[in-house]
DNA sequence: TTTTCAACAACAAACGTTTGTGCAATCGTT
DNA sequence: AACGATTGCACAAACGTTTGTTGTTGAAAA
């Protein structure tokens, strides 16, 4: 069954294709009567525009690319909902790619974005991306890029994150304010910007409060760098009365071990940086620094749309976080 | 900076555009020397094909649409990874839409897919979708549809799910095999096919083992239909020694209440249907019927690609589940 | 009546590719 | 040497839209 195109409608109504096109897009040159005739016929013969033809002719694409390093279940869903909430009303469609944390793959994807003539790129960079060099092809092609969540700071590209350092600082402070002195910090891949910043906030808070700490109080947990046995050993040996987690993902990784060793909820206070879902799925509920993945996605998408509409200002937006004090921190 | 197209390359090499096109796609008509000249130039002037032009001319799109009802954090990520693992090597790109559980939105999206001339559709239907009528426009346009996870059975469309009934049956059986008699079943929206099937497996297992049960032993928990207070009241009043959860999402919702009431881990055995991540984030670890979101996504994507390549057979694939016996069920 | 000017619609080109066809040069065969 | 077959490329059309330009009306202004 051949689909009806503009030409078909034109023949049916004895009009020129250009008239159909303009009628459907409410061009002032076309009389109201003709417009309604055309629109009626378009519905009747269920005409659907061929977007490839349209975008080809218009030299754009109606596409926004989303490039993700992986599918982190604790954050990406929220992020995507935030992005989607903006994009859905913008007339753009979302085309999605996964870099699998490979910089090579990321470069390929960027080429692919160019081939698709996407009009904007939202990217959370891979773990192995340490500069923005490969974004310049996009910049040069006039395609705005907005980094979100996992970002590389650059004066040339907009980024949206939370204020990692402040978040970590405030989380740590909450523990200290409740008289915790032996705080274990659990962090992810130390090469990542996000880890560095949160670590900085953690350390700064400790030293601001004149709390001594050694590097032994910090555990880096990423990929399979440290398995649960090693972790368990570590938790057994280290004396601590509180744990700060830089993400809920990390908390969930360690949580079973804490239970197993009977460290939680009795003996250990806990604070995590979280998007606010996980804390309520545990009892007692976890005090956390709430950051909204939804907000990040939404804000990044909005910034991207602004740039796509010609606003050229580069921004580094930091989404605010708030302390949510629940039962996992006690006196 | 204008991007180089085939015509530009043609001028540069004093060749005809058609020759460039064929050279790049290794057409036998072109001599090896010309091919290498062309390819070298293509790289040098970083030629990238304009996919809109190509797909427009070829009357296809290189796009596979993924339509999701919402962003369930316990399942969708796995699902997408599975889909992506297949698609990434297929030359297709993935364009993604969210129906927000609205049938109207779902219809709009399907129209949009037609406009995009997508070559295949993967869809997990919305909660308010009760038939496949709106898929026929795709079928009529020759666009294969594969439903996954949340599906509507239909002789006309392929679907990929787990064998919900068997999974629920086996999960329940595991409790019974460990001498549990008072089993509380926790289920989602009873209007959904998936709920009906899992419920059927649950009930069948109970009656097969001559265990009496009333509807009071079944709790439906969805959206905000039942809030935590009501749930808590219910759990307090109902006597039970085991709980069967039809999904890990539901388990995580109820988990804090179980902890609060001191029902878990001591007094209550637990089994859930799960994709296998959550059970290890709890201690003691949760016995579960493991179903792989990844497998479902992968299988569905493979089925879709087969259909896109002309295999016309409609299938109802059921991904196998396995019992993973951990510590949450005791004697 | 003639001129002017809207209002409306037709015409035609263009977007970058792919692909069916045509054609010259070369090759192999007798 | 003459012929057909093959090789390697050029030519041109086409895909469905949009859009700049041109043309035709009919009515208002002169």
Image: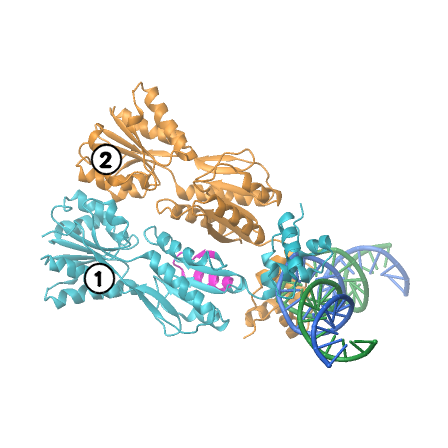
Chain colours: A cyan, B orange, C green, D blue
* Residue A201 placement (x, y as % from top left): 21, 65
Quarter of the image for residue D25 reads: bottom right
**Residue A328 in picture, x, y percent from top left:** 16, 50
> Is residue B146 part of the magenta span, yes or no?
no
State which quarter of the image contains the N terminus of chain A.
Answer: top right
The mark total stands at 2
Q: Chain of mark 2?
A: B
Q: Quadrant of residue A205?
A: bottom left
Crowd band around label 2 with a 10 angstrom C-alpha radius: few (<14), some (14–19), many (20+)? some
Tell me the magenta residue range.
A95-113
Q: Position of residue A117 (x, y in %)?
A: 53, 64
- Secondary structure of the residue carrying tag 1 is helix
Give the mark toward the camera: 2 or 1: 1
In the structure shown, which secondary structural element does the residue marked by tag 2 occupy?
loop
User: Is any part of residue A216 visible from this angle?
Assistant: no
Label 2 to label 1, Cα distance in Å? 35 Å
Residue A106 lies in the magenta stretch? yes
Query: In screen coordinates, is A185 left or right of C23?
Result: left
Residue B273 is at least partly visible in this image: yes
x, y percentage for residue A116? 53, 61
The residue at the far top in this view is B210
Near mark 1 (Cα within 10 A), the count class, few <14, some 14-19 or many ≥20, is: many
Proximity of marks 2 and 1: CB atoms separated by less than 8 Å: no
Please tell me whether residue A3 is drawn above or below residue A173 in the rendered image.
Answer: above
User: Relative to B156, does residue A257 appear above or below in the rendering?
Assistant: below
- Please give the name of the residue rendered at 54% of the width and 75% of the height, measured from the top-left corner: B1
Circle 1 marks a residue in which chain?
A
Residue under pointer 2? B327
The image shows residue B120, relative to residue A89, as above or below, that is above
Q: Residue at x 11, y 53 (%)?
A: A241
Q: Which mark is residue A168?
A: 1
Q: Same chain for labels 2 and 1? Say yes or no.
A: no
């Amino acid at each position: 069954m051949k689909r009806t195109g503009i030409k078909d409608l034109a023949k049916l109504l004895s009009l020129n294709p250009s008239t159909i096109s303009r009628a459907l897009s409410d061009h002032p040159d076309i009389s109201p009567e003709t417009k309604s005739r055309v629109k009626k016929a378009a519905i009747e013969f269920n005409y659907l525009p061929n977007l490839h033809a349209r975008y080809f002719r218009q030299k754009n694409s109606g596409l926004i690319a989303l490039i993700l390093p992986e599918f982190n279940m604790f954050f990406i869903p929220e992020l995507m909902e935030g992005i989607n909430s903006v994009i859905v009303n913008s007339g753009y469609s979302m085309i999605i790619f996964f870099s699998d944390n490979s910089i090579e793959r990321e470069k390929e994807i960027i080429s692919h974005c160019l081939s698709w003539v996407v009009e904007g790129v939202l990217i959370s960079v891979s773990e192995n991306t340490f500069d923005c060099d490969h974004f310049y092809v996009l910049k040069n092609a006039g395609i705005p890029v907005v980094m979100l969540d996992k970002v590389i700071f650059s004066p040339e590209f907009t980024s949206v994150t939370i204020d990692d350092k402040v978040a970590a600082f405030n989380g740590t402070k909450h523990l200290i304010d409740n008289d915790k002195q032996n705080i274990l910090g659990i962090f992810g891949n130390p090469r990542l910007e996000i880890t560095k910043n949160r670590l900085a906030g953690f350390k700064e808070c400790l030293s601001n409060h004149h709390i001594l700490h050694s590097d032994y109080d910090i555990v880096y947990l990423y990929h399979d760098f440290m398995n649960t046995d090693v972790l368990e050993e570590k938790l057994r040996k280290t004396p601590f009365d509180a744990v700060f987690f830089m993400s809920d993902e990390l908390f969930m990784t360690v949580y079973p071990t804490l239970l197993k060793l009977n460290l939680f909820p009795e003996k250990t206070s806990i604070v995590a940086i979280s998007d606010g879902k996980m804390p309520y799925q545990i009892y007692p509920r976890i005090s956390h620094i709430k950051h909204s993945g939804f907000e990040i996605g939404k804000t990044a998408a909005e910034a991207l749309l602004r740039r796509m509409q010609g606003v050229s200002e580069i921004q580094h937006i930091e989404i605010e976080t708030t302390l949510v004090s629940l039962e996992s921190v006690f006196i």
